[in-house]
Image (spheres, rainbow, N blue to C red):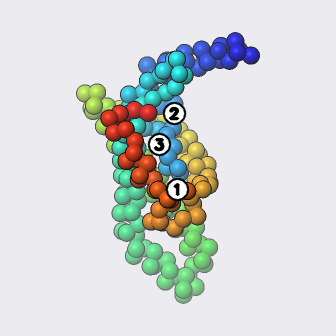
Amino acid sequence: MEAAEENIHSIIRKRLREYTQEMDIETPQHTIQVRRDLSDGPLPDLSIDDDKFELSCNWRELYTIFYGEITISENLLKGWSESQKGWAEGMRAQMETGGMSMMSVLQQAMGAFASKNNDAIKIARRARVKRQFKLLGKDWDPEVDGRPGLERDILKGLADVRQVCSMEEFEDDEFDDGEEADDADGSDEDDEWEDEDESSDHE
């Protein structure tokens, strides 16, 4: 059994090395999930420890890029939502006067929100990809240099995985927004971060 396991490990190491050497900015073959948030952003300074059979990366930079992309998409969606207040009030008025059914109002609202959410995710992802190319000294224009069909497939795949992520349950979901979940010994998550070795950006 040990020989078989080592053979499998050798195959995995080989494929991981090939992947780290041939990572494609536009078409990465990985996803990053933090709770219900998802991205296919970069894995900065990704390396492999063959002896320990471990992967490591600059997790601080990873989180910075990850949440930067998430924030862009959320802000775009928030801006759109605020601009649609008049439209929402109009549909409500039609529903109250019998011009539209509640089901029609809900379907239109949910359809519009989902569409704009997808647009916001695409724009944020394009901004991140463009920045990745810029760091390599390359100008990348999604409308000129991008591959629409490929991008569409990637976004669809991410949306499918994101749908699965949205249904995951976490132990601290019972806590209200803004309420900190303390550990059993009374310390909170912030204390754990502060206790970590600040001299290393890798895990």
Indicate the secondary structure of the residue bearing disc 1: loop
Q: Can residue 187 be seen in this view?
A: yes
The residue pinned by badge 1 equals 185
Q: Which residue is located at x 51 percent, y 43 percent?
A: 33
The residue pinned by badge 2 equals 30
View extreme (left): residue: 137
Q: In which quarter of the image is residue 5?
A: top right
Alpha-carbon distance for marks 3 and 1? Answer: 33 Å
**Which residue type carries mark 1?**
Asp
Foreground: 180 or 138? Answer: 180
Instruction: Tell me the quarter of the image containing the N terminus.
Output: top right
View extreme (bottom): residue: 97
Indicate the secondary structure of the residue bearing disc 2: loop
Alpha-carbon distance for marks 2 and 3? Answer: 9 Å
All told, the count of numbered labels is 3
Q: Which residue is located at x 58 percent, y 85 percent?
A: 98
| Residue contact at pointers 3 and 1, CB within 8 angstroms | no
Alpha-carbon distance for marks 1 and 2? Answer: 36 Å
View extreme (right): residue: 1
Crowdedness near tag 2: few (<14), some (14–19) or many (≥20) residues, C-alpha within 10 Å: few
Up the image or down, 80 lies above or below 36; here it is below
The residue pinned by badge 3 equals 39
**Which residue type carries mark 3?**
Ser
Crowdedness near tag 1: few (<14), some (14–19) or many (≥20) residues, C-alpha within 10 Å: few
Q: Which residue is located at x 40 percent, y 74 percent?
A: 85
Q: Is residue 87 left or right of 135 when viewed as pictured?
A: right
